[in-house]
Amino acid sequence: MKLCGYGAVFYLLLSLFLAPAYSQTIYTENFPPYNYQVDGKLQGLSSQMIQKMAHEIGVEPSISFLPWARAYKYAKERENSGIYSIVRIPSRESDFHWVGPIETVNMGIYTSELSGDEYFGENEERLGQAKIAPSIGVQRGGAAEKILTSMGFKNLDHSETTRKAILRLINHRYELLALDGNYLQFILEAESIPLTRIRRVADIGTFDLYLAFSRSTPIEVVKKWQQALDIIRSRSAKESDDVIN
């Protein structure tokens, strides 16, 4: 069984080396702890995986940080361009070729600890109560906006960045805010805001993050990135097995 595993990895590596090289531009946004910059250096869980995949392929893509809406537009419209960390949902499916998953987010709806409104019952009941709240802050064009819209929410208030939306919640300009819990914790700690200032009132769900390429990107390029990810996952699994054994 191990020989078969080694053989699969060998052929994946061979296909990468034989594939032609392409110049690529990959866009992303400031979305810690998944992708962000420190002193101009790429950081984050998703960024680390993208760097590992690029190293496996033997390319050095240009990675640009942009506001989400612009990053999405460029990645969708420009040949040989990509975007990460992006949630794969039905409304986006036909816009891209998909590589992943590379990470996972856990989205919820939050309110200020000082809010006097109570949310009670099972999660579905609390989601129903959130539907009739005065406002729910979401990032414009972000996954939370798309997902809540598909769930029938009509009370969404759009912010250009999720960080701005968090500060609006803290300042009571939003009744509720929908976003990933890890990102929320990162920003609160960065702003020296106690975590107790925010409470989670409902779960939206767990969603995978992907690297996605424009539909005009050659499919062989997309396959190279997926193969690189598969190799990394396979190698990691083997290393874990070796530790256990």
Image: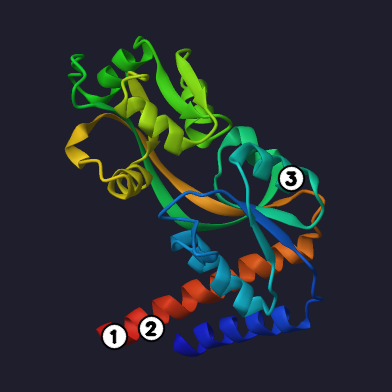
Nearest the camera: 65 or 78? 65
Q: Is residue 211 left or right of residue 213?
A: left
Across and down, in percent, residue 40 comes to: 55, 64
- Identify the residue at image location x=66%, y=45%: 71
Compute the Cα span from label 1 to label 3. 43 Å
Nearest the camera: 3 or 31? 31
- Quadrant including the N terminus: bottom left
**Of the two numbered discs 2 and 3 in the rendering, the one whose residue sits closer to the viewer:** 3
Residue linked to disc 1: 243
Contact? badges 1 and 2 (CB < 8 Å): yes
Tell me the number on the disc at residue 239.
Answer: 2
Q: Is residue 36 visible?
A: yes
Tell me the number on the disc at residue 74.
Answer: 3
- Identify the residue at image location x=82%, y=53%: 79
> Which amino acid type is shown beneath numbered disc 1?
Val
> What secondary structure is found at the residue carrying circle 2?
helix
First reached walking from the N terminus: tag 1 or tag 3:
3
> Which amino acid type is shown beneath numbered disc 2?
Glu
First reached walking from the N terminus: tag 2 or tag 3:
3
- Identify the residue at image location x=43%, y=24%: 137
